[in-house]
Amino acid sequence: MTERVTLAQIAEATGFSVMTVSNVLNDRPGASDSTRKKVAKAAAQLGYIPSSAARNLKGGRTGLVGIIADVTNPYGLEIVRGVMDELESSDLELLISSNHNDRGREYERVDFLTRGFVDALVLMVPALEQPTIDLLVERRRPVVIVDPRRFDIDLPRIVVDNYGGMRQATQHLLDLGHTEIGYLSGVWEFESSRERFSGFEDAMRLAGLTVPPELKAICEFNYASGFQNAQKMISASHPTAIVCGADTLAMGAIDAVRSLGMSVPQDVSVVGFDDLPQASHSYPGLTTVRQPLHDMGQLAARSVASQLNGTGPLMERMLFNTTLIVRGSTAAPRGGDSTALDAAVSFSE
Amino acid sequence: MTERVTLAQIAEATGFSVMTVSNVLNDRPGASDSTRKKVAKAAAQLGYIPSSAARNLKGGRTGLVGIIADVTNPYGLEIVRGVMDELESSDLELLISSNHNDRGREYERVDFLTRGFVDALVLMVPALEQPTIDLLVERRRPVVIVDPRRFDIDLPRIVVDNYGGMRQATQHLLDLGHTEIGYLSGVWEFESSRERFSGFEDAMRLAGLTVPPELKAICEFNYASGFQNAQKMISASHPTAIVCGADTLAMGAIDAVRSLGMSVPQDVSVVGFDDLPQASHSYPGLTTVRQPLHDMGQLAARSVASQLNGTGPLMERMLFNTTLIVRGSTAAPRGGDSTALDAAVSFSE
DNA sequence: CTGTTAGCGCCTTCAG
DNA sequence: CTGAAGGCGCTAACAG
């Protein structure tokens, strides 16, 4: 077994005190150049490895940022990527606790991670219950909540303009000449789902259109649910376009159109929300509302880092804008406006 | 600031010694029932949180398993999921270090993580260089390598039957009556890519067929590369089927067929390798060779856990079999065998 | 510029 | 069954 090399051993080898060695190895002032060299050399030769445990014990810090998210979901994964990429350039490491198969155990996860495992926490959880929020406050660790499902939480949080994004997407279809537009919503308990639907509804209303109940369906946030609900809606009500509250739903809707022997966008246009990587990696490319997921993750990381510095959370509420990305899955309805049909595959990221 | 509750405080509150409290709280023998009750009660009331740092300092363990993988890649992500799910039921936590934007910095990652951050390591990296392997050996931490790109490494590793899987997939196309079969390979430096191609080649050879160079292309492991190479190959050589060394390539190939105004599987059959979740979440479903990615991750976790127990790595070389999953993307060639065409979307898995 | 002292929270060892 | 001493490796806070 390779013995652990400690400061004391280097001290012994060089003849200096442990403290001097510690100072040198941590780039602290108070050490002559000649001492620095000797110590550095000895440390390298002996293969010194600092003990993070001992450091933590002293400083009460682990250097770990925890994130609770569902990495199984491409949406969550993108945000995690942002967090990772940002943390890369710091001295913090990321501890991922994926809650993909234990929804609702947020409390236990938060409890465990804040028992001294992590210095700070990024949360992206479907439902944040009051006890969990209380625990979070009690533990007094830096926290950022990304895309909270409730908006009345008094913790630093990162949110996105769901309403405006969806309104713009709907306007795009209206501009193309669509009037029979269906809507596939995500889980209704999520505030973001309701916000998105409001954006859709308002755009329709301002165009003098109403949304009949048969052109609205609530889905689970997955491909299969989008597929099934779209299939049902198209067979029954023949919309010329479908707006979806998430890209995964849109992917399902596109395949539902195909399964009925029709084409996207010739027979039915489809719009998504998120702009997951898959949205551009498909044929035709998916017209969708881009959320800057990666940026959101980065900001989350920067915010907790800043809180750890004692600089504060940057801001309490960070709102990101969305962008409409037009790809091949939308076009004018048959016999409608004759906007050029761009069905080329887009490799744009 | 919530003060950290320590053993000493509980000792003071109950009148017992620190040691007795420690014994109770760790379910060690040597404590009367009445003592146990009193101590447990006090601990609960004061909200005791054990300090992992202090424990680690003593025991030299952090309770963390590190994994180095590219979670950006759905393939890697599936394995990570397996590791997570297995670790869930243990007292180990997972520290993920994603190398998606720093390929080749494996050495630094291994170095950092084994500096006392993690007790054990799961590795899934594209290229494992000799210095990294040496470091791994030197650090003497339990390690498992999943899907190593080189097979001459003398560390516990998890491998998959690439050759057999691809041979079976090719046989499936031959059985359907295909003879003009193209092959899209993944990066040639990976041993697994070469193994898969061997499986393809041998199946063809045994059927009395040869693979002309224009029906073989080497791709990057991504959608765009599959799309481009398939488009070129189909335009130039008109194969009736394409076998791909990865599902991501196959997804690209399917869209390439569509981009040329043709259909899958009517005009061109497509076969993948991996069976990523997306393979069944598409229309038509992708016929592919399933690797038990989740199981592989689970076994990796179990192996390092077992090494940490001192029970050893279970085995040095763990070989997983593959399974051919037939979905809608393959059918008999036009005018060929009249096998029933099942183009139904599969929601299996 | 360098060294000494003391203690972070816990657990092993050995006495009561 | 319970307690006292000592130390894991490191670093603040002081001396010299």
Image (spheres, coloured by chain):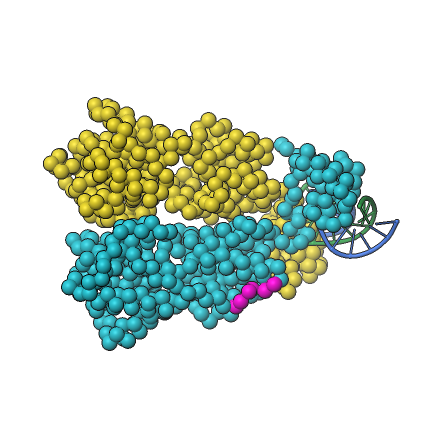
Chain colours: A cyan, B yellow, C green, D blue
Magenta-colored segment: predominant secondary structure:
loop
Residue at 53% of width from left, 49% of height from top?
A88
Left or right of residue A299, residue A197 in this image: left
Query: Against A164, is B4 above or below?
Result: above
Please provide percent x and percent y for residue B180. Answer: 20, 32
Q: Nearer the viewer, residue A265 or A137?
A: A265
Please provide percent x and percent y for residue B243. Answer: 27, 35
Please provide percent x and percent y for residue B213. Answer: 27, 28
Q: How many marks?
A: 0
Query: Against B307, is A194 above or below?
Result: below
Q: Quadrant of the N terminus of chain A?
A: top right
Left or right of residue B261, residue B294 in this image: right
Q: Nearer the viewer, residue B153 or A300?
A: A300
Residue A103 seen = yes
The region drawn magenta spans A311-316
Residue at 40% of width from left, 67% of height from top?
A161
Residue A312 is a magenta residue? yes
